[in-house]
Image (spheres, helix red, strand yellow):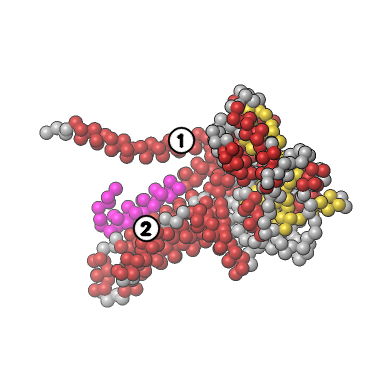
Amino acid sequence: MSTPRRHRVVERLLALVAWSAVIALALIFLFIAREGLPALWHGDVGALFAPRRWPGYDEAAFIWQPVGKPPKLNLVPLLVGSLKVTTLAMVAALPLGVGCAIWVAEIASPRVRAVVKPTIELLAALPSVVVGLFAALVLADVGRRLFGFTYRLNASIAAAGLVLAIVPIIFTVAEDALSSVPQRMREASFALGARRWQTTLFVVVPAAIPGLTAAAVLGFGRAIGETMIILMASGNASVLAPFDPFSSARTMTATIAAELGETVRGGEHWRVLFLLGVLLFVVTSVLNRLGAWATDRLARRLGREVSR
Amino acid sequence: MVLLVQRWAARFDEAHPTIAVEVSGGGSGTGLAALENGTADIASASRAIRPEERARIERARGARVEEHRVAIDAVAVYVHPSNPIEALSLDELRALYTGRARAWPSDGRAIVLYSRENSSGTYAYFKERVLHDADFAPEVQPLPGTAAVLYAVSRDRFGLGYGGVARPRAVRVVPLRVGDAIVAPTRQEAHAGRYPLARPLYLYTLEGARPSVARFVDWVRGPEGQALVEDQGFFPVGEAPIARRP
């Protein structure tokens, strides 16, 4: 029996739709790579990464000052800024997200779970402009009043906003991981006389470790790619102060957003902004692959069929 | 400047319903880039066009770029209303914004410096005119738009910012010290050339553009357009008295 013609047509169409996402992604990458990578061989690569003593400066420094004479396009302050804000956000969001997940998956009653779980997940639907506005207008003043920050807008304020954006992601993935630990493992643990907290801490959480890793990795990926919250709340000064959470931070994403509109198409500044895009693209796709790999491991470890 | 252009566009639309004017913001460079790409008929800019920009546009579009002065903007320096400082000289501003001086003389607390993003014409103007093309200190926080700078300074007792004179709200405008004189950014001082941070605002068009483009520019430079310039807190062009609408 041969497949009817129209079935084949529909199959082809669906395959095309499925592949279109892959093709779009490949084309986007090609586009930003074509614009950005030439910065590495046409421009002055040393100036992108190494400190330099510019005219008028007392010592060699990492300077991002793309409009000026001469333009100074050192990426180090931006890399440091991105890592600083993201790390700060993760330090707060990881325990929060995983803690919520453990509570919802293991401890809360089904009725409470039915309220709390969708609420936290709804947080992810908050547009980042709204979160950014909240951070820049409310958190910034609160921070200054409570802690007397020198800078009203600083990396810790942006990180606080980011926490709101990434906790739902960490929570959702972690909660899935914990809930997918088979009931029989818990029952076996109870049968051996373990209490609930012992079961949670020594059986369920270790079994779900790959899933929790995926949660962390995906949260990190979301945080490093976030733009609006940081643009509005971090102060955006390109200082090189990796260990001062209360100074400003200029991230790669915010830099692209703030500067691309002005740059001359095809110029050096334009290429370097696209190079930042390539860096971000590579980092987030590696992180996403890592997250997917960790989820696979979880599934295999728990003896289930890998669905992908 | 984008707010002023939006007001012009809205009022012009009422008077000329057959001509649609669409306004989009982003900074002087953004507008000139749009003129080059052909996505805009008119570029508004708060700085004069650079020779290389003019060359690029003329090469890309095959027509001469025409410049129209449409208003005078003075860049004002803002502090928090509680700040007692009487006046600042351009040298003092330069020392602060390049990071050579870091504290308020009044109480020694660190100054928090606000600036505009580097896509802004005001940024370029300030960098050239005040910093003499030196770099801003890395600690300077660039903000997207004069409104953002105004808000930040209004919330920050140790803040110092700069931006247009158009309706500064909830901040104090600090006059500039020029020699022994103290000059405030007023229309008289700007027109007399005494206020050191006053600059013209421009519209740029292409020679041989559609007639509707010329009509808009003429209208902007005429009494109705110039009345809106005053409404928005800029100074009108030309010495001639401006006919005000009732």
Query: Horizontal placement of A277 versus A178: left or right?
Result: right
Mark 2 and mark 1 on one chain: yes
On the image, the x and y values in percent for residue A221 come to 45, 52
Rendered-image quadrant of the N terminus of chain A:
top left
* A298 inside magenta stretch: yes
Q: Tell me the kind of residue under disc 2.
A: Val
Q: Is residue A128 visible?
A: yes
Along the horizontal axis of the image, is B224 left or right of A213?
A: right
Residue at 43% across, 47% down: A286
Residue lying farthest to the left in this orientation:
A1
Residue A175 in picture, x, y percent from top left: 35, 62
CA separation in Å, label 2 and label 1: 30 Å
Q: From which residue to which does the magenta span run?
A: A284-308
Quadrant for residue B236, please give it.
top right
**Which residue does the numbered mark 1 point to in the structure image?**
A30
- The mark found on residue A173 in the picture is 2
Please tell me which of labels 2 and 1 falls first in the chain.
1
Magenta part, dominant SS: helix
Chain under disc 1: A
- Say which of B216 and B174 sits in front: B216
